[in-house]
């Protein structure tokens, strides 16, 4: 976990955003596999690596960063379920 001099979680969230985007790239490369494989990859590897500190940094971080992470989750759903890019995914 990374915290700046003002004790905010913004640096940590920026690193998390970068890490999530890289893992999403791996998920895209696994599209050719049966649907259960990318789904397992997402729920067993990606989600825990993105949400592990949510209890700590969830209330004290920039809401724009949370919205960006939410968009990445939606993009992952579109990749896993082969949904069109123009479709909005709501959870």
Image (cartoon, rainbow, N blue to C red):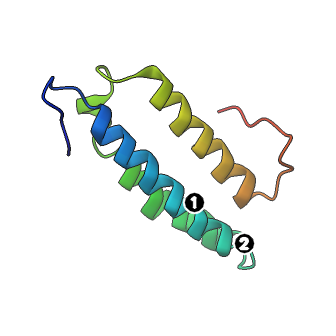
Q: Which residue lies furthest to the bottom in this view?
A: 33
Q: Percent from the top left, x then y, of residue 81?
A: 76, 57
Task: Name the residue at the front extreme.
Answer: 5
- Look at 18% across and 33% down and name the residue there: 4
- Mark 1 is surrounded, within 10 Å at the Cα level, by few (under 14), some (14 to 19) or many (20 or more) other residues, namely some
Q: In which quarter of the image is residue 29?
A: bottom right
Q: Image point 29% across, 38% down: which residue?
A: 11
Which is more toward the observer, 35 or 13? 13
Q: Is mark 1 on a helix, strand or loop?
A: helix
| Left or right of 57 on screen, residue 5 | left
Which residue position is annotated with label 2? Answer: 31
Quadrant of res 27: bottom right
Horizontal side of 72 relative to 77 (left or right) equals left
Q: Which residue is drawn at 31% across and 20% down?
A: 59
Q: In which quarter of the image is the C terminus?
A: top right
Residue at the spot of label 1: 24
- 34 with respect to 53 (left or right): right
Point 18% across, 36% down: residue? 3
Residue 47's tag is none
Q: Which of marks 1 and 2 is in front?
A: 1
Q: x, y (%) of residue 85?
A: 83, 47
Q: Where is residue 88 in the image (x, y as percent from the top left)?
A: 78, 35
Left/right placement of residue 15 relative to residue 57 reads right
């Amino acid at each position: 976990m990374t915290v700046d001099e003002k004790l905010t979680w913004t640096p940590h969230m920026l690193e998390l955003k970068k890490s999530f985007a890289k893992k999403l790239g791996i998920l895209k490369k696994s599209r050719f596999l049966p649907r259960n494989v990318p789904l397992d990859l997402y729920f067993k590897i990606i989600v825990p690596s993105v949400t592990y500190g949510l209890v700590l940094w969830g209330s004290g971080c920039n809401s724009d960063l949370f919205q960006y992470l939410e968009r990445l989750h939606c993009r992952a759903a579109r990749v896993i379920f082969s949904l069109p890019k123009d479709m909005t995914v709501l959870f």
